[in-house]
Amino acid sequence: MGKGDTKKASKDSCHAELEAPGTKPKKIDRETYYAELEKLQVELVKLQEWVKHEGLRVVVIFEGRDAAGKGGAIKRITEALNPRVCRVVALPAPTEREDTQWYFQRYVQQLPAAGEIVLFDRSWYNRAVVERVMDWSTEAEVQEFFRDCPEFERMLKRSGIILIKYWFSISDDEQDRRFQERIDDPLRRWKFSDTDLQGRDRWEGFSRAKDEMFKYTDTKESPWWVVEGDVKKRARLNCIHHLLQQIPYEDVLPKPFKLPARKKSTGGYVRPPIDSQTYVPEVY
C-alpha cells in the first residue's frame, strides 16, 4: 500500500470475524457500511490514477455461485471510477464462430492495455465450473482447460499483467433467500433465469467442480482469494479492502484548485427564446 494506506479504513468494522467455522458473520449497519465504502472508494480512485500514471495493466476475476455477490462488489468498485480506465467484461455465450476458436481467444481480446483495469464478471473459468456442471463442455475439454489454464495465467503475468482472482462463497440457504428476493422484486426478476434454477439443483456438482478447479488453478503464482459472501455489505468491503492491498500505489491525484473567473464573451451571442425549442415536460 502506498500513501493512500487503507489501514486507516477501520479494519475492525469491515472484516467479518467468525466465532467458529461455518458461523455466519453479523450484518453491518448502514451508516458504518457507507462510511467505510466511501473511504475505500476514495482509495480506489487513487489506485486508478496510479494505474494510469504508471501504465499498469490489471485484470481482476470475479467468480462464484449465482447470487454470491460478484455483481454487487463489481458495481461498488466501478461506480466512482472512470469507465475509460476501469471496464467490466461480462461476455455472453460464445457464438458458433467463437466455439471453433482457441478457448482463451475471446478473453484475450478483452485484456487491458497500459493504464487500464479490466474486471471480469465471470471469465475463462466458465469452462471449469458452469460449463462442466451444466454439461455444456466435454470432460476432455475440461481436462484440457486444467492443463492450459495455469500456463496461460503464467504467460499473462510474465507479460506484466497484474492478475487477481476472487471466488465469492455463499451458503445454500442464503442463495435460496436471494433467489426468492429476485423473483419477488420486479426490478430484479430479470436476474433469475432457468439456468439459475437448474444450477440450484446441482449444488453438489458445483461444489465438486469448484474444488477440482482450485486443485489445478490455485497456484502460488496466481492464487484464488475466497470472499465470504453470506453478508453482502461485509463481502464488498472486505473484497475492496483486499484488492487495494494487492497493488502498491501512491496518491497522484491532481490537487484541488479554485476555478478562475469565466472569460467574458466577446461574440455578442444571444440565447434563443425558450419557446423556440422543445423541452422535456417537467413532471417532477
Image (cartoon, helix red, strand yellow):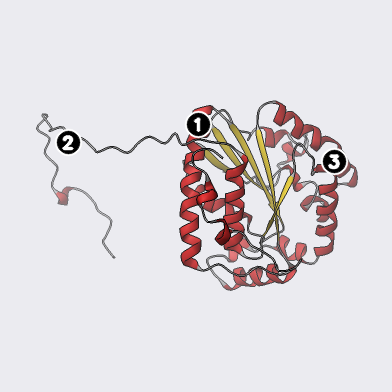
Residue at the (20%, 35%) spot, across then down: 260
Give the label, 3 or 1, closer to the camera. Answer: 1
Q: Residues within 10 Å of mark 1 (few under 14, many from 20)?
A: some
User: Which quadrant, please, contains the N terminus?
Assistant: top right
Q: Disc 3 marks which amino acid?
A: Phe
Q: List the single residue furthest toward the top.
A: 159
Q: Earlier in the sequence, mark 2 or mark 1?
A: 1
Q: Which mark is residue 52?
A: 1
Q: Report which quarter residue 232 is drawn in.
A: bottom right
- At numbered mark 2, what does the secondary structure look like: helix, strand or loop? loop
Whether 81 is drawn above or below 22: the answer is above
Horizontal arrangement in the rendering, residue 55 relative to residue 153 (left or right): left
Marks 3 and 2, how far apart in space? 62 Å
Q: Nearer the viewer, residue 93 or 89?
A: 89
Residue 163 locus on image (x, y percent) = 67, 37
Residue at the (46%, 36%) spot, across then down: 251
Marks 3 and 1, how far apart in space? 33 Å
Residue 140 locus on image (x, y percent) = 90, 42
The residue beneath circle 2 is 261
Q: Residues within 10 Å of mark 3 (few under 14, many from 20)?
A: many
User: Which quadrant, please, contains the C terminus?
Assistant: bottom left
Q: Nearer the viewer, residue 51 or 276?
A: 51
Q: Which mark is residue 156?
A: none
Q: Disc 1 marks which amino acid?
A: Lys
Residue at the (69%, 66%) spot, across then down: 18
- At numbered mark 3, what does the secondary structure look like: helix, strand or loop? helix
The residue beneath circle 3 is 146
Q: Earlier in the sequence, mark 3 or mark 1?
A: 1
Q: Report which quarter residue 230 is drawn in.
A: bottom right
Q: Residues within 10 Å of mark 2 (few under 14, many from 20)?
A: few
Residue 110 locus on image (x, y percent) = 63, 35
Tell me if I can see residue 226 in this picture: yes
